Image (cartoon, rainbow, N blue to C red):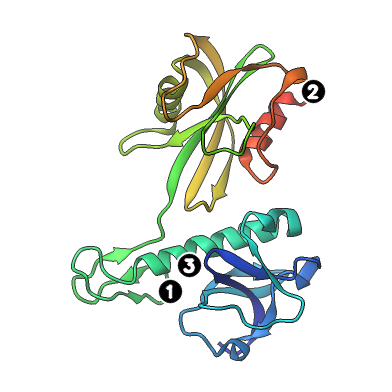
Amino acid sequence: MTTAGYWILRVEHRLLVHAGQGGGAFFPFAPASALGNPENALYVGEFLGQPCHAIDLDAFPGIPGAEPVPLRAVFTLAGPEAFALAGRAAQLLDWQANHRFCGRCGTPTVRREGELAMGCPGCGLLAYPRLSPAVMVLVRDGERLLLARSPHFKPGVFSALAGFVEPGETLEECAVREVREEVGIEIARLRYFASQPWPFPNSLMVAFFADYAGGTITPQPEEIEAADWFVPGALPLLPEPVSIARRLIDAALAPV
């Protein structure tokens, strides 16, 4: 690796960026030799037409004007393209770090050439980057929107319902089950909205609209702190624009 390119440098889940600058200056740009030609760097794509690599470090190098920020801040500071690339980098770095040893026999793994796989030279097991699909559902009853809050949310924030897909389950079956489990109601007319990679830590969010089909809101203990119907003129605090949850809610509120 001799050519110069952009670098996503991570230390304990913080990234080194030029936070006060936009455009190509956001991720540090340097030749690999400036970082000691790291052997475990991962190619994660292109940024502004240049190659971009990612690596975990024990400490950040001294780069004038650069500062560490959390991954979520990348969206606000540099926009969706930079956030998507940084999210991909975070997931691949986690995958590499979490599969240094074979999960079957414990042998140290080796990264395979030409594909994203950590291979075991002992038993041949291949470990690919993990994706955890999750379904998000915004339930509507006329103009009313069903929003709920998890105890893990920021104070006052309500969002659409969401949950992970279980083995052997379709996305549609997951949506029905999660809504029923989390708030005790039934839904109908499930309609796909959009999807979003969500690197916290490795989800793929698949968002839907659905219509209310009966039942009384009964929040699931320990999972849902509060849930209720809200009308457009009296909404609670909503998720940040970085999430597909906010896009889903904004789409529901947009004039037809």
Label 1, secondary structure: give it. Answer: loop
**Disc sitting over residue 255 in the figure:** 2
Q: Is residue 86 left or right of residue 18?
A: left
Dividing the picture into quadrants, the one containing residue 86 is: bottom right
Label 3, secondary structure: give it. Answer: helix
Q: Residue furthest front?
A: 155
Give the residue type that dot 1 points to: Gly
Instruction: Report which residue position mark 1 lands on.
Output: 114
Instruction: Report which residue position mark 3 lands on.
Output: 93
Residue 13 seen in the figure: yes
| The C terminus lies in quadrant | top right
Dividing the picture into quadrants, the one containing residue 47 is: bottom right
Which residue does the image show at 44% across and 43% down from the upper left?
133
Q: Is residue 107 above or below residue 82?
A: below
**Disc sitting over residue 144 in the figure:** none
Label 1 neighbour load within 10 Å: few <14, some 14-19, many 20+: few
- Which is more N-terminal, label 1 or label 2? 1
Which residue does the image show at 64% across and 31% down from the upper left?
156
| The N terminus lies in quadrant | bottom right
Provide residue 98's location: percent of width, then percent of height: 37, 65
